[in-house]
Amino acid sequence: MRVLIITSNPPFPPQQGGALRVYGIIRGLFQQQHRVTLACFVDVETPESYTPLSAICEEIITVPMPARSKLDRIRDLAFSRQPDIAGRLNSVAMRKRLRELVEQHEFDLIQFEGIEMVIYLPFIHALKQQGLTRAALIYDSFNAEAQLQRLIAKVEEHRLKRLPMAVYSHIQARRIARFEAYICALADAVIAVSDEDADALRAWRPDRKIYIVPNGIHTDEYIKHPQKLNLGDQVLVFTGKMDYRPNVDAMLWFTSDIFPALQAHLPDLRLVIVGQKPHRSLDGLRDHPNISITGWVEAVQPYLHAASVYIAPLRMGSGTRLKILEAMASGCAVVATPIAASGLNMQVRQALRLAEDAPAQIESILRLLNNADERAFLGNLAQERVRTGYDWDVIIPYLLDIYKDIGVG
């Protein structure tokens, strides 16, 4: 089977949710003897270098990342009915390269990774109508994006200074819903990462059929790591792309409503926030003597192995949080909100501690910090549950079954 994967960035190194998913899919297809072509954007300032993608992709097509100014975004917000997210990676150069690809190769399947890249599905669909390709067109949704914007708005609207962002999210939720309905009806198949996301997208399909392929990781890569860190005896760790609104909100809430109460019991407790592109709204945390913000790191595993407790205090989001799977595969005891754990199966949810509000977070974290045996038990259980449910070796067969169900492969 010959597959074209269209994604926003090269999925290596796989250090955030979308890249982890896309790299897992490409590697899994390669291991099953399928031929994969990758098309993506690259930062023109980033020099090309060898990555494992070169070994597992038959061809890699790159296009310079399109530029989009704040003025462009304001104009589109005011004068367009399209969602903001659908215009971020709009590129004439990408359309040109995609047309060349479908004219040069007989792809069996073309898979669009995430809502930012599914904007090219109508373009490929038009080429298909012209007889230039017979490929099945699949939308692999990372999130139910309209539902995500509704959740963000619900959180933001309770804070006066965030009210403009709440209004923005309400507008975007309506626009994204129209866009999702259009794309889901046009695609030959739509994949969600969780039952919850599938329920949110199902109304947009005439046949109401949404396939589910959960997010996954290569669990063996998290059991051990050659780099060792000593962050102290009492340390909380959070990981994620730190310009992503749900992650920023989680850390602002945690540091204002939860961390001070924890420090009242454990004055030496530290919080380490690990992830690229920290948002400027987090700058005030840098002055706190017990809070560290790392920025980009080469690997998250050393931080996960050094954590006393891994926290996931998200109040908004959708899909499956790969950060939680990474932490559990590393043997961390995890405290998460129900929103953060949504999309995970029941077996995995039983291997972490759920705590919705600040008092429950404080109680759960303190209990684990004061009980090494319980931390070890949860960590071992977490590793086993993630290995049997969310390793790519387990997940790829689900994806191949979907391809067969729509007549491919």
Image (cartoon, rainbow, N blue to C red):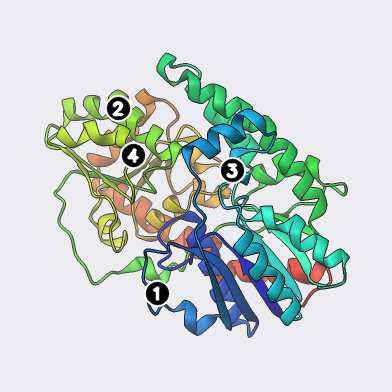
**Quadrant for the N terminus in the image:** bottom right
Q: CA distance from mark 1 to mark 4?
A: 27 Å
Q: CA distance from mark 4 to mark 3?
A: 19 Å
Is residue 157 depicted above or below 373 in this figure? Answer: above
- Circle 3 residue: 85
Report if residue 25 is visible in the image.
no
- Circle 4 residue: 279
Q: Which residue is rendered at x = 52% and y = 23% of the image? A: 166
| Front one among 126 and 175 | 126
Q: Which residue is rendered at x = 31% and y = 63% of the image? A: 299
Mark 4 in CB contact with mark 3 (< 8 angstroms): no
- Circle 2 residue: 258
Q: Which residue is rendered at x = 68% and y = 75% of the image? A: 101
- Which residue is most to the top? 160
Looking at marks 4 and 3 on the same chain, the residue that comes earlier in the sequence is marked by 3
Bin the neighbour count of mark 1 within 10 Å (Cα to Cα): few under 14, some 14-19, many 20 and up. Answer: few
